[in-house]
Image (tube, rainbow, N blue to C red):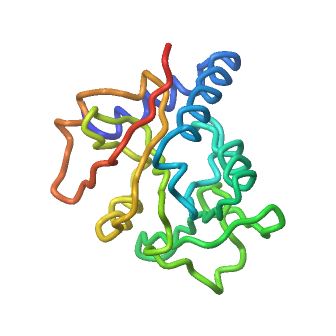
């Protein structure tokens, strides 16, 4: 199986996931995350503004603010380069070409060294943390010289050992996976 096939299959499964099951999974993931040592020891958290049918991040962002953490969100720039910017409740956003919400004001990029914890999105993962993302390699490029903590949050059906067969030399594994239970 190739990466594109995995992407299509997982996206189809995500779209078909019943609302109640999605809500249950999201609640489990938020609980696992905010009770983790990675979360508790972090002051600055990087996270995407997820869109349906991705794993929800809105409540994670609210939990970070409630805990006094700073939140940074990505901007997908030229040459498939990610950069992160502080995000607050009143931060102006704009929609990217692919429909993602990103910071409108990009005057002050947050250096990688200041981001303690990065919640990395993806579609499918191996147990060792290798992932199939949405395509484009944005996060692989960013992670190549990022030395903070990396985690991903996922539904049980997103764990697939076939991902191991697709690992390429530039792929960077995620350090810890939080997986919702059936």
The percent position of residue 146, horizontal first and vertical second, equals: 35, 68
Where, quadrant-wise, is the N terminus in this rendering?
Answer: top left
At horizontal 64% and vertical 20% (from top left) the residue drawn is 24
Going by the picture, which residue comes out furthest to the top? Answer: 182
Q: Is 56 in front, or is 134?
A: 56
Going by the picture, which residue comes out furthest to the bottom? Answer: 107
Q: Is 31 in front, or is 10?
A: 31
The percent position of residue 123, horizontal first and vertical second, equals: 43, 38
Q: Is residue 80 above or below residue 28?
A: below
The percent position of residue 120, horizontal first and vertical second, equals: 46, 51
At horizontal 65% and vertical 60% (from top left) the residue drawn is 69
The percent position of residue 68, horizontal first and vertical second, equals: 70, 59
Going by the picture, which residue comes out furthest to the right? Answer: 90
Q: Is residue 167 above or below residue 165?
A: below
Instruction: Give left or right: position of 46 versus 123.
Output: right
* The quarter of the displayed image where residue 89 is located: bottom right
Instruction: Give left or right: position of 3 versus 38.
Output: left
Q: Is residue 163 above or below residue 111?
A: above
At horizontal 43% and vertical 72% (from top left) the residue drawn is 81
């Amino acid at each position: 199986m190739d990466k594109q096939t995995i992407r299509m299959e997982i996206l189809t499964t995500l779209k078909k996931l019943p609302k109640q099951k999605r809500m249950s999974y999201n609640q489990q993931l938020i609980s696992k995350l905010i009770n983790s040592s990675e979360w508790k020891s972090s002051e600055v958290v990087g996270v995407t503004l997820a869109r349906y049918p991705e794993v929800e991040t809105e409540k994670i962002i609210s939990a970070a603010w409630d805990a006094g953490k700073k939140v940074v969100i990505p901007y997908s720039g030229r040459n498939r380069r990610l950069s992160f910017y502080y995000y607050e409740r009143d931060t102006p956003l704009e929609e990217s070409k692919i429909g993602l919400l990103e910071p409108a004001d990009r005057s002050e990029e947050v250096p990688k060294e200041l981001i303690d914890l990065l919640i990395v999105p993806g579609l499918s993962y191996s147990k060792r943390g290798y992932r199939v993302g949405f395509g484009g390699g944005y996060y692989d490029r960013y992670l190549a010289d990022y030395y903070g903590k990396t985690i991903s949050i996922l539904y049980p059906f997103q764990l697939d050992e076939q991902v191991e067969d697709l690992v390429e030399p530039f792929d960077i594994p995620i350090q810890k996976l939080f997986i919702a239970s059936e």
